[in-house]
Image (cartoon, rainbow, N blue to C red):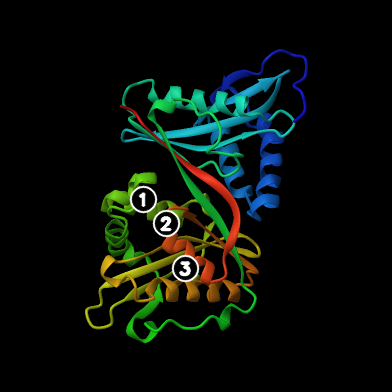
Amino acid sequence: MAALPEVGAPQLVELDRLRAETLEAVLEEETEHWRQTLEWDFRPSADLVRRFVRMRALSGWALVAAGEVIGYSYFVAEDGKGLIGDLYVLAQFRSTELENRLLEAALTSLFADGQVRRVEAQLMLLEAPLERPVPYRQWWRGYRRYFMVADLAGVDRLPRSASADQIRIERFRESLEEEAARLIAAAYRGHIDSQINDQYRSVSGARRFLANIVQYPGCGSFHAPASLVAFEPTSCELVGLSLASLVSARVGHITQICTAPEARGRGVGYELLRRSMIELARARCAKVSLTVTAANWRAVRLYERTGFHLLRIFAAYVWNRS
């Protein structure tokens, strides 16, 4: 890491005091970092940051040194919960100290009015996320997560599940959102991922989660042909779903996959994943990625059997204010 220029410590400045153009160098480097590290096209997300900074509608902080922005973070708050959406510092200046200044500023802002009791963050590009000091550590818990990737060449040779003829698989459609929300809430009841994302704990939260996946680019551009649902053929009950997006021209991403508790152990999740991967290959994707919590070892093993391998370790951060 290069030494900081001799201009004194970088200063924290609120994002709504800056012009969007001052973030350009940071956003351009971050976009390239996402491309090189995860083969992910970050440009749609960067464009949203530019748009909302230009509108003075994005809460967050920037680090400014010698009149230049060298890093930024932003956050949102709603219904007593905060979400730190991103944090990035230019490689020339990057250090745990500077990243933590941005992280602490965001957390202090969120906790300041007393309404926010919980903050979540999944900052994909932080190095050694579970081995570093963390602000507000007395309220913090970290969860190890894996970013996994699979090649799609030959994906059509993956064997069909034994349960393939015992379920009916269709494309996900808007009219199924309420059923899907109920499925997600049931699937994650008592699951470690509901500790990471509290939207999984209720039907209303799962409904918001689905809306974010379909409407916003944070997890890529929603790809309907590879987004599938599984039904019991006799009862027509929804028992599984696999949702997919495109994160670059040649890379797909599984944004959500889950099965109803009563359908587990039958290969429903595998069959949905297999068919989503085939549809992504048909869309000319060469690779597909997904994320999984390391403690969810059954899911990790399923993904490994389906051809996924570990590309990057990252962390989910949660602060619960006591």
- 293 or 122, nearer to the observer: 293
Give the amino acid at mark 3.
Leu
Q: Which residue is located at x 22 percent, y 79 percent?
A: 235
The local crowd at label 2, few if under 14, some if 14 to 19, many if 20 or more residues have their Cα within 10 Å, is few
Q: Earlier in the sequence, mark 2 or mark 3?
A: 2
- Determine whether 198 is above or below 59 in the image: below
Q: Position of residue 134 (x, y in %)?
A: 50, 29
In which quadrant is the N terminus drawn?
top right
Q: Position of residue 248 (x, y in %)?
A: 63, 59
Q: Position of residue 138 (x, y in %)?
A: 39, 26
Q: Which residue is located at x 29 percent, y 56 percent?
A: 185
Give the amino acid at mark 1.
Ile
**Label disc, if present, on residue 296 of the rendered structure:** 2
User: Disc 1 marks which residue?
Assistant: 192
Label 2, secondary structure: give it: loop
In which quadrant is the C terminus drawn?
top left
Are dots 1 and 2 in contact, CB under 8 Å? yes
Q: Earlier in the sequence, mark 1 or mark 2?
A: 1
**Label disc, if present, on residue 302 of the rendered structure:** 3
Tell me if 190 is positioned left or right of 284 in this view.
left
Question: Quadrant of residue 14 in the image?
Answer: top right
- Determine whether 175 is above or below 24 in the image: below
